[in-house]
Amino acid sequence: MHSSRSIWGKITNYVNIKIGKSIHGEENERLKIEFETELCRRFHIRYPIFLAGMAGGPSTVKLTASVSNAGGLGTLGAAYMEPAAIREAICEIRKLTDAPFGVNLFVVHASDDNSRIVEVQRELNQIRDVLGISHADKEGVTSPDLFEKQFAVVLEEKVPVISTAFGVLPEPLMQQAKLAGMQVVAMVTTVQEAILAQQAGCDAVVAQGSEAGGHRGTFDISIHPMGANVGTFALVPQIVDRVTIPVIAAGGIMDGRGLVAALALGAQGVQMGTRFLTAIESGAHVSYQQALLESTEESTVLTKAFSGRPARGIGNEFIRKWDASGIDPLPFPTHNTLTRDIRNAAAIQKNADYMSLWAGQGTRMLTSGQHAADIVAQTMQQALSIFS
Ligand SMILES: Cc1cc2nc3c(=O)[nH]c(=O)nc-3n(C[C@H](O)[C@H](O)[C@H](O)COP(=O)(O)O)c2cc1C
């Protein structure tokens, strides 16, 4: 058995502890210790903390820039944004920070499947009745080359980091990103996916454990219909042992304890999503934030009911009604398009029972009313306190 001393010794193989300036920039007495991993050096960030790109509302320009300014890597979740809106957001982020930041996209080739549209719309219409909104019978239509157009903007803007979910950049796009000097990160849920990402040329992988909020990053859901669901503690070291690129741990990491644990498992950083949902700069709807703050470690479920792809969120009436119907959702992105009017109406009505409340399993560790920069600083200080 290792003594605790030798465990810390192992951690410090990954973590270079240095004395520097105050974490808040105060010049005088306070000292800080930087956790500078190889990931930090390669991505030019002070702290090994990535903000998850959180598409569909929670991600904002201010949240992204705040995390980058605080020394982490802010990431804009741009998967549902039109290319012009992505360009505008990148421009706004650059006005707020000189630090590196990332843009996150879904690698999807959006071919719609409307094969069971009548059955699915009939069920959704019953939910529309509850919210008092008009019935729909239309097919879900997604712009077929949305991903390519989104990527083109990110490339033209030479964003420092591009990260992807649901797969890796196709080869020509990977080459273009590399030629433009961008760092490329893919989110993975198995060792096999991590190896594929490394072979494809990724500079780092996010190892997403099953505790994570939001969509499962699993590449091929025809093999894993509910996503690969390995816990963060089991997944991270197994990936670390089999790839040479830096591994970033994600899923249930909410504070400095999680950061230190992830580093002990061999990760070189963490990606946190849920932790930032209640930050002042978060775009998460107020009713969603309230549901998060009232939730427990048992509140979330894995569901395909909102989007057709497995995702973790707080269980609510929409999910219960959909499950009770016994109907399979249509595949992503079609089902996601079909439920959009319902989610939008629920947001207007401040009715969290019909919104998608994506969240990880660590929600009891959430706080409200904190700036994103304070969350970064607090995480680092807490990690530091474990060593003192
Ligand atoms: C509200 C929400 C939205 C998310 N959206 C995305 C996304 O657009 N792209 C992505 O790669 N990951 C997304 N994720 C997953 C994160 O990348 C990450 O795996 C997860 O947040 C880590 O677990 P945690 O939520 O417990 O911190 C999302 C997570 C949440 C909570």
Image (cartoon, rainbow, N blue to C red):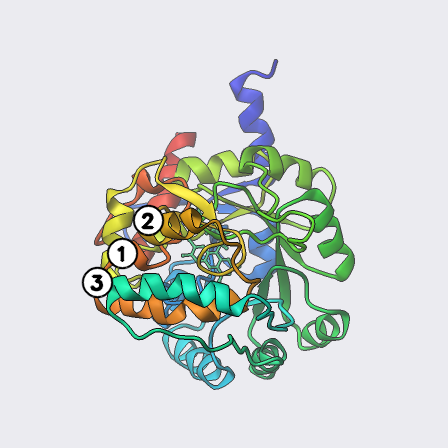
Residue 34, how many percent across, how many down?
46, 46
Amino acid type, callout 1: Ala
Task: Name the element at disc 1.
Answer: helix
Q: Residue furthest top?
A: 1
Return the residue nearer the eye: 336 or 84: 336
Question: Residue at point 71% right, 37% down?
Answer: 241
- Indicate which disc residue 316 carries: 2
Contact, CB < 8 Å: mark 3 with mark 1?
yes
Q: Is residue 229 left or right of residue 298?
A: right
**Separation (CA) of disc 1 from disc 2:** 8 Å
Are there few (<14), some (14-19), or many (20+) residues within 10 Å of tag 3?
some
Residue 315, how many percent across, how many down?
36, 46
Contact, CB < 8 Å: mark 1 with mark 2?
yes
Mark closest to the chain's N terminus, 2 or 3: 2
The answer to whether residue 254 shows anywhere in this view is: no
Amino acid type, callout 2: Asn
- Indicate which disc residue 352 carries: 1
Residue 57, how many percent across, how many down?
37, 67
Give the answer, above or below, for where 238 lies relative to 367.
above
Q: Is residue 195 left or right of residue 65?
A: right
